Amino acid sequence: MLLRKKTSHILLASIIFTFTLLSGTLLTKADDEADGDDNGEGKLVYVIPIEKEVERGLESFLNRSTQEAIDAGANHIIFEINTPGGRVDSAKNIGNLLDDLDVPSTSFILSDALSAGSYIALFTDDIYMKPNATMGASGVINEDGTAADKKAQSAWLAAMEAAAESKSGRDPLYALAMADPNIDLPEYGAPKGEFLTLSPNEAVEVDYAQGIFQNREEVLHELGLTNATVVEMETTVAEEIARFITNPVVIPILLSIASLGLIVELYSPGFGVPGSMGILALVLFFYGHIIAGLAGMEAVLLLIIGIGLIVAEFFVTGGILGLLGMGAIIGSLFMSGYDLSHMSLSIAIAFIVAVVAGVVLYKFIGMEKGLFRRIILQDRTTTELGYVSTANRLELIGMEGATVTPLRPAGTALFDNERIDVVSEGSFIELDKKVKVIKVEGMRVVVREIKN
C-alpha cells in the first residue's frame, strides 16, 4: 500500500513538471511573437523623399511611388520632407493623394517643410521632426514674389484649415497662422504681421508633431518597425529631368532658346548648331512635360503638324500655311502647360526674343545668307548688272532739230530724220522752229528753242 501511494505521488509530480515545462515553452513562444510584432518583423515600409520644389514633376513621382508601395503591400509609408514649398495646385493634388491613402503614413521632416511642404505634411497620420527642422511659413505668393490676390489667399487658407482637420487632434488655428499673417501668436514667434513657423519643440507642444528624432532608425523604433523591411524610393533620371524642365523658371528659358536657335538658323548657311539647339530645346520641353504627365501624344502630333505646315510654306506661296503652322505649334505648347497664364507669359518672352534676334540679324547680316537666300528672290535687274529698264538717249544731248508739232510744252521734233517725243523747258514753241536738246532724263527729252 505504501509503495502504491509513493508511485502515485511520483507520477503526479511528473505530470505537473511536464505541464509546467510545456506552459513555459508556449509562453516564451507567444512572448517572442509579440516582440516580433512590436519590432515590425515581417512588415514592409516604404520611404519616399519629398525634396526640392513642389511642382508637377514631384507630383508625378509621388503618384508612381505610392502606387508601387500599395501594389507591394506596404504596411507603412514614411515621407522624408525637405522642401521650401512650391506650386499651390501641385501641393493640393499631392495632399489629395496622401489623404486618400489607405496605408498608414508618417512625415519625417529632415530640414524644412515650408509653405506647400507644411500643407503636405499635415495629410499624414504622424509627423516627426529632426532637432533643427522647421515647419510653416505657408503664405501664398505669386511667381513674381508679390502677395496673391484676396481670392487666392482665401482659397489657400481654407485648404490649410482642411489639411489640419484631415487628422484628428490638430488645432487648425496654427495651420491658419502659417498662411495668415493677421493671426497673432507672439508666444510662438509669430506676432501679427508675420507667418507662423514652428520649431520642433513648438510643433510637439501644439500637437502638430509627435516627437523629435535624430534619424530614420529612431522613427522606425518609435513606430514599432525596427526590424521591418525598408524600401527607399528614388527618382529616376527621367523624373529628375522632368522636374527640372517643368520648373516655372526653366520653361521660358527653353522656349526662348528654341525660338532664338530657329531664327539664327535662318541666317546660317546649311543646318548647324543654332537649329540643333532650337530643336533640342523643343524636344526637351515636350519630353519633360510628357514624363510629368502634363502633355500627351496629341500635343506632340499637333507640334509635328505645325512644323510640317511651316516647311510646306517654303514651297507654297500665300502665307496661310505658315500662319496655320505657327498656330498649331503655339496650340501644342498650351496643351502641354499646366498653367495658362504662365504658358502665355513664357510664349510671349520667347516671341520677344525671336523678334529682337530677327531685327538684329537683319540689320547686320541682311537676307542674303542662310535659308533666306533659298526662299527669297535675290536677283536684281540693276544697271550695274547690265539691265536697262528704259532706253536712256544720252547721245541726243546737244543735237539740233526742228519741231514737227507745236510744243505745249510737249510735242514732237525731228532729229536726223528721227521723230522723237520731246518737251520744252516750259515755254510754248511753234511748228517748224529750230530746237536743241539740252538734257535727257530717262524717257524725258528736254529741248530749248534756238533763237536766230
Image (cartoon, rainbow, N blue to C red):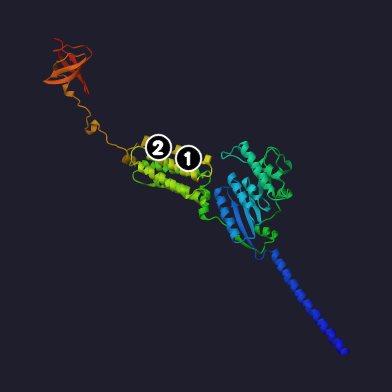
SS state under label 2: helix
Dot 1 crowding, Cα within 10 Å, few <14, some 14–19, many 20+: many
Eyeballing the image, is 385 above or below 254?
above
Residue 98 location (% of width, % of height)? 63, 52
Q: Furthest-right residue in view?
A: 2
Q: Amino acid at mark 1?
A: Ile
Residue 383 location (% of width, % of height)? 23, 30
Residue 317 location (% of width, % of height)? 33, 38
Q: Earlier in the sequence, mark 1 or mark 2?
A: 1
Residue 77 location (% of width, % of height)? 63, 57
Residue at the spot of label 2 = 358
Q: What label does residue 347 carry, if any?
A: 1
301 displayed left or right of 56? left
Q: Amino acid at mark 2?
A: Gly
Dot 2 crowding, Cα within 10 Å, few <14, some 14–19, many 20+: some
The nearer-to-camera label among 1 and 2 is 1
Identify the residue at image location x=65%, y=54%: 108
